[in-house]
Amino acid sequence: MTKALDPRSRRSRRALQEALLTLLADQELGEITVSRVTRRAGTSRSTFYDHYTDVHELAAEACTAQFDELLAAAPVFAGRPAPDGQGRTNPLSQLFTHVAAHARLYDALLGPEGSARVINHLHHRIAIAFFVNRSAPADPDRTHATDPDEIPLDPAAAFHAGALIGVVMDWLRRGCPRGPDEMAEAVWPLVRAAGRESSDGREEPSPRYVD
């Protein structure tokens, strides 16, 4: 079990993560030093090394924290109506918009010299989300903030999580040539197909979705 951080440690980590994300707006991850991060965060180098071994470890934690916040706010699309009540919304627009906004961070951590920890974390969280989207009862107010930490073995969820991460990695590798909404529109039918099969393998009717 991970030891809970005290409020001061949480504030320090948050400040360092936010400093790194600010620096990444203008620099590549490999160009950012501990000194630059600590100056931006208003902390000391000793504070940095109390929490992280290097900038790459800080980046990994910043990435997973950002992704977890995004996912926690995302609606479970089972039973989620569109604003006009005519269909279900496409939640992937938020995902691709988020990745595009932090492209340097994700490109560094999901690329050839990236972080296995980050890739594993994203895959795990997305697989859980796929499982919940298929198995949760319809509730228009439910988000992924209440997702379980673990799920039963679910090859379909693991497969589709890996496929979605693969699409994101390929998009980043190519320099994000299509916009987030265009990517979401292209990938959404594939996610819909994943959602047609229930967790026990039975085929379910396909609902109508909107972009």
Image (spheres, rainbow, N blue to C red):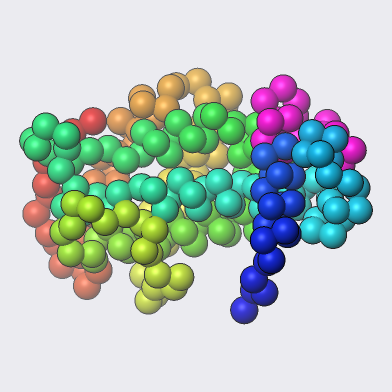
| Left or right side of 24 for 193 | left
Q: Which residues are magenta?
A: 20-37
**Residue 72: in sight, yes or no?**
yes
Quarter occupied by the N terminus: bottom right
Q: Give how far across and how far down residue 80 sits, in percent.
A: 19, 48
Within the image, what quadrant is residue 161 found in? Answer: bottom left
At horizontal 67% and vertical 39% (from top left) the residue drawn is 18
| Depth order, front residue of 92/205 | 92
Within the image, what quadrant is residue 179 found in? Answer: top left
| Left or right side of 10 for 150 | left
| Depth order, front residue of 211/145 | 145
| Left or right side of 94 for 169 | right
Q: How many marks?
A: 0
| Depth order, front residue of 196/91 | 91
Q: Give how far across and how far down residue 190 sits, in percent.
A: 29, 43
At horizontal 74% and vertical 51% (from top left) the residue drawn is 12
114, above or below 174, in the image: below
122, above or below 170, in the image: below
Q: Give how far across and how far down residue 150 sits, in percent.
A: 44, 73
Asked if the stretch drawn in magenta spans residue 167, the answer is no
174, above or below 125, in the image: above
At horizontal 77% and vertical 47% (from top left) the residue drawn is 56
**Residue 30: in sight, yes or no?**
no
The rendered magenta stretch, by its main secondary structure, is classed as: helix
At horizontal 83% and vertical 44% (from top left) the residue drawn is 43
| Depth order, front residue of 30/174 | 30
Asked if the stretch drawn in magenta spans residue 29, the answer is yes
